Amino acid sequence: MNATKNTEQPLVSVIITTYHNEAYLPRAVECVLHQTYPAVELIVVDDNPPESDARRATEAVMKRYPQAVYLKHPENRNGAAARNTGIRAAKGTYIAFLDNDDVYFRTHLSDCVRALETHPECGAVLCGVVKIRGGNCWDVVRPPEGDLIRALFLSETALGTGSNLFVRAGLVRETGGFDESFRRHQDVEFGVRLFSLCDACRIPEVQIVKEMDGFSNRPDFERFRATKEHFIQKFERELASLSKEEQARFYAGQWSSLLYAACSEGNRERIRAAADEIRKYRSVSSKERFLIFLSEFHIFFVYEGIKRFLKRRKSGRIYNQVTKNLTEYDRKIFLDMLRG
């Protein structure tokens, strides 16, 4: 869909950024090509190093989709830079983002356009997201109510996925795009700046599937801490506007994430430091104490096994909830994703 024109409907530019995980890419492209909304420009930004196997595999995939705008970085730059490359190329009235391992259900773009055309006071749309991992439905994330900036500060997973950003193009450019100095938390950082300019329409129904098998859940502790310190420094003024209780929740949440990273590495010094920081804001939770205990005996993997078991028990209920009102086409896509 290379800038498909429709004189009656505004153009939507969908930006897919891809880095490794090229096996997932055709699925993401196909979900855009099969949207019920007709006026779509598909832009795929390849952030793989030029001489890598991933670049060659991605090029082979994209030969099947000549209707897409295919842009290749001369070197790996990061996801924020890839999104900015797509933004600069986008011609649409609206811009939607899609990670290469995620999928939209068929009416997503139509519903988002309708929401913003009906609500000119809003600048973006957020919808429900279902997360899947290892063939199981992991979780459902609904759009947060109330103040969106506060929601993002208090839960860095409030968006569900970076694919849950459908925005008026003018507002995307007014923000200056994504901050390329962030290697993680890029979506949260962008969201805080975006929602300082506008409110969002909320669509509670699940319209996006987030694939969690395509990325590592174990960030490097030092790089993770540096990103969080960078985020805190950038939004120091906004964080100061939170209540004392909310500030305590925010900082404890940041250190809880870092405690998880330290426990997964089994680094006692970092575990102790993260736990001490948490205690400045609240008591260490029973879950956090359990993680520390497992790490002491180098059996952190037990926690991951327990978590998979508990999520598997809930998977069927989540599946029935998500598929209750899906079309046959979307139900098949969803089931195929779960089957791998």
Image: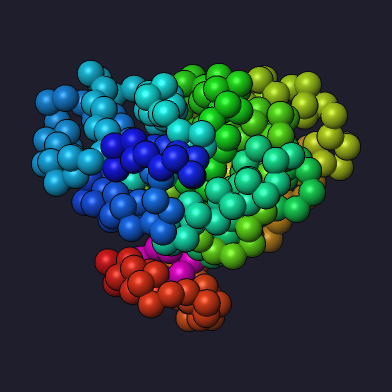
Looking at the rendered image, the quarter that the N terminus falls into is top left
Q: Quadrant of residue 74?
A: top left
Q: Main secondary structure of the magenta part?
A: strand
Q: Nearer the viewer, residue 311 or 160?
A: 160
Q: Is residue 145 above or below residue 85?
A: below
Q: Is residue 27 above or below residue 228?
A: below
Q: Quadrant of residue 247?
A: top right
Q: Is residue 200 visible?
A: yes
Does residue 251 appear left or right of residue 241 in this picture?
left
Q: Nearer the viewer, residue 317 or 257?
A: 317
Q: Nearer the viewer, residue 291 or 92?
A: 92
User: Is residue 134 found inside the magenta-colored segment of the image?
Assistant: yes
Q: Position of residue 263 (x, y in %)?
A: 51, 47
Looking at the rendered image, the quarter that the C terminus falls into is bottom left
Q: Is residue 110 above or below residue 51?
A: below
Q: Is residue 295 visible?
A: no
Name the residue furthest front: 7
Q: Position of residue 280 (x, y in %)?
A: 78, 37
Q: Name which residue lies at 35% across and 51% down.
A: 32
Q: Name which residue lies at 30% across and 70% down.
A: 336
User: Is residue 146 found inside the magenta-colored segment of the image?
Assistant: no
Q: Position of residue 195 (x, y in %)?
A: 69, 34
Q: Name which residue lies at 62% across and 35% down.
A: 191
Q: Position of residue 277 (x, y in %)?
A: 70, 36
Does residue 246 appear left or right of residue 210 in this picture?
right
Q: Nearer the viewer, residue 306 or 81?
A: 81
Q: Name which residue lies at 64% across and 31% down.
A: 194
Q: What is the span of residues highlighted in magenta in the rendered image?
A: 131-138
Does residue 189 appear left or right of residue 24 in this picture?
right
